[in-house]
Image (cartoon, grey):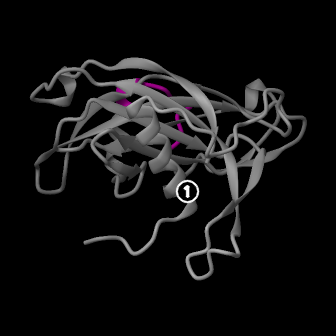
């Protein structure tokens, strides 16, 4: 089934993936400022790790998870409302957490043995000031059933910086409309080889950068 339209976020996600995986450089989208124009949370994270969890039918399902900690040193209490999108060079676009059962988080928490770890839903909300009030959670998504070589994780909700751009108006090209982009952290990984199971998959960090999306 072919989608009728693309949202602004999807449009720039698709564009950034095409450019990142093809080596093309463009100035199509604005870039974040070098000096932060707005508040920004401190964000620490670990590389993706696989975990197998049985579903209600007793079948093994594979998931990937990334542990992280978010800290608010912005000068005031703020809301933490993250958005995690996982995309691959094979065209996958996954909203992390969507369709992931509670039992998966339970299995992850048992493995990492961290009593401070909050579920992806419970971590959303007020983020108090200071390192001692940081929150720890995980980004979780279902493993694809096909082989991928490169994966990008887009992390939104970490900054208050935005940019307004003009986008084409499908109904009247002479009257472009405005769209708001937000500062987003893009983290890239290389998944070499084609192992039979995710637990045999090597994960290589390929860098990170801030983009407007």
Q: Position of residue 63 (x, y in %)?
A: 28, 40
Residue 51: x percent and y percent? Answer: 27, 33
Measured as percent of width and height from the top left, residue 199 is found at 20, 25
Work out which quarter of the rendered image holds the N terminus and state it: bottom left
Q: Residues within 10 Å of mark 1 (few under 14, many from 20)?
A: some
Residues 89 and 117: in front is: 89
Residue 175 quadrant: bottom right
The kind of secondary structure element at disc 1 is: helix
Say whether residue 103 is magenta. no
Q: Nearer the viewer, residue 14 or 77?
A: 14
In the picture of the structure, the residue carrying the numbered disc 1 is: 9
Which quarter of the figure has residue 72? Answer: top right
Residue at 56% across, 40% down: 155
User: Taking 202 as reference, is 57 above or below it?
Assistant: below
Q: Is residue 116 visible?
A: yes
Range of residues picked out in magenta:
110-120
Q: Nearer the viewer, residue 158 or 173?
A: 173
Residue appearing at x 43%, y 48% in the figure: 96
Predominant SS along the magenta part: loop
């Amino acid at each position: 089934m072919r989608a009728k339209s693309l949202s602004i976020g999807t449009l720039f996600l698709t564009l950034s993936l095409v450019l990142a995986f093809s080596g093309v450089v463009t100035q199509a989208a604005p870039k974040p400022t070098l000096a932060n124009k707005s508040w920004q949370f401190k964000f620490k994270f670990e590389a993706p790790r696989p975990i197998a969890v049985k579903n209600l039918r007793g079948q093994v399902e594979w998931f990937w998870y990334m542990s992280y900690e978010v800290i608010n040193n912005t000068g005031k209490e703020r809301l933490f409302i993250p958005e995690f999108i996982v995309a691959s060079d094979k065209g996958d676009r996954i909203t992390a957490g969507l369709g992931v059962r509670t039992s998966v988080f339970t299995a992850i928490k048992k493995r990492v043995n961290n009593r401070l770890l909050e579920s992806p839903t419970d971590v959303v909300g007020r983020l108090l000031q200071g390192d001692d009030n940081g929150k720890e959670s995980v980004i979780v998504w279902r493993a694809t059933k096909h082989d991928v070589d490169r994966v990008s994780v887009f992390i939104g909700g970490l900054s208050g910086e935005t940019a307004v751009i003009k986008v084409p108006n499908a109904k009247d090209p002479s009257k472009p409309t405005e769209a708001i982009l937000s500062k987003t952290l893009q983290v890239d990984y290389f998944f070499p080889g084609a192992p039979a199971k995710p637990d045999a998959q090597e994960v290589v960090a390929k860098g990170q950068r801030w983009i407007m999306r």
